[in-house]
Amino acid sequence: MEHIETINSILKQRGYRRSSLRTHLMTLLVKRNKPLSVIDIQSALAQKVVHAHITTVYRELALLQKEGFVIEVQFGENKKLYELTPTDHHHHLVCLSCNDVQDIILDNDLDAAEHLINRTTRFKVTSHSLEFFGTCATCQP
Ligand SMILES: [Zn+2]
Ligand SMILES: [Zn+2]
């Protein structure tokens, strides 16, 4: 978990006290390798480490988000999931049946679409996010 140690030392330089809950939380995000909800995070931590109050989980996520190490992904109206800030640029495949979320990297991404937008509307795209909704392999009959 080299990446996590790097984050921990950067946070230390920025004046944050080290927290074992935070380390466990980041380890979980690395291991699962997909966006997780606060409830997922809390129950996974409870199985492995300590029972962390939901407010504590929110607080750690907010801290990591503020410092740029975690991003919040919005799925639909009320569903917020969290993942470590990706080092690659990817999108998500969301199963509407089991709620599983997978990462997907697209060849050429949306470069062509961004060029088209730029050319036809003179709107300068600086970023995008894209989620695909459907049924995962396991949930298909
Ligand atoms: Zn599924
Ligand atoms: Zn993209």
Image (spheres, rainbow, N blue to C red):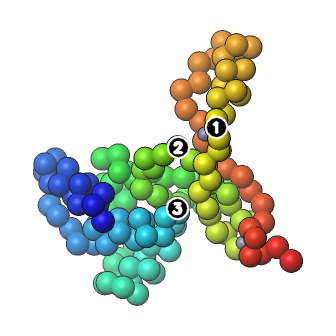
Q: Earlier in the sequence, mark 1 or mark 3?
A: 3
Q: Is mark 1 within 8 Å of ligand 2?
A: yes
Label pair 2/1, CB-CB below 8 angstroms? yes
In the image, 63: left or right of 122?
A: left
**Residue beneath disc 3:** 35
- Residue 112 horizontal/vertical position (percent): 70, 27
**Residue beneath disc 1:** 109
Label pair 1/3, CB-CB below 8 angstroms? no
**Residue beneath disc 2:** 89
Residue 116, image quadrant: top right
- Residue 51 horizontal/vertical position (percent): 34, 84
Question: Do we see residue 35 in this rendering?
Answer: yes
- Above or below, 29 against 6 in this view is below
Q: Report the amino acid beneath label 2.
A: His
- Gap between marks 2 and 1, in whole Å? 9 Å
Q: Report the amino acid beneath label 3.
A: Pro
- Specify few, some or many for label 1: CA neighbours under 10 Å numbering under 14, 14-19, or 20 or more: few
Residue located at (38% from left, 79% from top)? 45
- Gap between marks 1 and 3, in whole Å? 20 Å
Q: Is mark 2 within 8 Å of ligand 2?
A: yes
